[in-house]
Amino acid sequence: MDFDLLVIGAGSGGLASAKRAARHGAKVGIIEGDRVGGTCVIRGCVPKKLLVYGSEYREILANAASYGWAVGSTGCNSSVLLENVRQEVDRLNGIHIKALANAGVELITGWGQFVDAHTVQVGDQQFTARQIMVAVGGRPQRLTIPGGELGWVSDDLFLQQHLPSSMLIIGAGYIACEFACILQGLGVAVTQVIRGDRILKGFDQELSDSVREGMEELGVTLRFGLQPTAIEQTQSAMVLRCGETALEADVVLQAAGRKAFLEPLALEKAGIAHDGHRISVDAQQRTNVPHIYAVGDVTDRINLTPVAIDEGRAVADALFASGTRTVNHDLVATAVFTQPELASVGLSEEDAKERFGTDAITIHKARFRDMHQALPKRGPRCLLKLVVETSSDRVLGCHMVGSHAAEIIQMGAIALGMGATKADFDRTMALHPSISEEFVTMG
């Protein structure tokens, strides 16, 4: 065998597993046909968050006068911002390549395809391994409608030299909502087209409604109840047809879903079971083939970078260090970097009431305007919310919409993981004046 562990995909989960396994003394190879770093580093979390920071300056500058600053005329040169983001991504790509070399992991450049259950082909080379991990992540999907090949998907946005003046965004999930806020903040006129009647389905409804209010105040136009049926390119614009309704903009961005990147792998040659959308795994991340594992977005459970990293490390520890830990998928903090920001850990109000019964749940919440907005007298309101099991006083969910929500909820996740009660929150001394103090002063 060429390797003890062969990893297909150098994204977050694959990198974490490869380096951990090498640290345990395993001979490890990792296959990647794109740049090293995966979705998060190359075309996801990292460049997106940099664009979030860039887009926030519009509101900062708009509020400056109320604090006595004379700023004058402002505007964002999107070409400069996009180029600087790409340079940072290039830097991180280089860091990850060096980290693999320093860890003793062999980087194999190209796209991997199974030959059999122990062999993967890359170009004209074949590599064998005792254990194999699939960590290829996902890809954005285009709509299967006439003209579905037109416009952008999220990956394309990071490749642009400049931004258009107007954009239609299809989708209601976190990617669509985040890009709507980013682009609106950077001066693009954004209309978001939503099939249903709400955004951010799956999150606590009261929180998603609060984000909706903030997005509309930011200037994003939200159009609900529209099902895209065709995209057309005219001489002057792109046209999105939704039945009898026609909407126009410079560009249509399709942000209505992602799918595991399974097609190039030839999984059937290794006997790996899948449904075309995901690879099923057990609690140890094993596929139906006992020596082949899958982590991250290809399993389509919780498609978040920290989850993929933890899964990858757990597999490496189990294989090469007699580890027995399995990843807890029940308590995972999530954030949506919209304006305003949403962050959440634990059960939503709806999920808690469905699981325990409406009468068994007590809701505590606070809604107010952040002190940062006291002088401008504008901007979205904060919403902080605790979902509590009445009989045990245990906090089941901790949720927030507002500035620095993700930073605050990370600490809330520790408390929930330790089984904190509402009384534990109540006897914690408040840090004043702050947003987060409201979590420990709610009645």
Image (spheres, grey):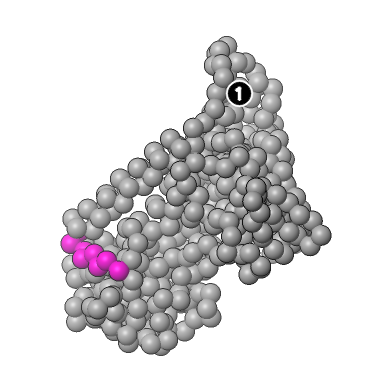
Out of 93 and 278, give the one closest to the viewer.
93
Instruction: Give coordinates of residue 392: x percent, y percent.
Output: 64, 54
Q: Is residue 73 above or below residue 398?
A: above
Which picture quadrant has residue 266? bottom left
Q: Quadrant of residue 38?
A: bottom left
- Return the x and y of residue 195 as percentages of the image width and height: 73, 59
Q: Is residue 424 something one can see in this rendering?
A: no
Q: Residue at x 18, y 62 (%)?
A: 104
Nearer the observer, 81 or 23 = 81
The answer to whether 15 appears left or right of 426 in the picture is left
- The percent coordinates of residue 278 (x first, y second) are 51, 74
Of residues 361 and 379, the one nearer the viewer is: 379
Q: Residue at x 49, y 41 (%)?
A: 162
Amino acid at dot 1:
Ala
In the rendered image, residue 104 lying in the magenta stretch gets the answer: yes
Which residue sits furthest front? 235
**How far across and down, in percent of the image, does residue 134 sit?**
38, 73
Residue 350 belongs to magenta span = no
What is the span of residues highlighted in magenta in the rendered image? 103-110
Q: Which residue is mark 1?
A: 62
Left or right: where 425 falls relative to 361: left
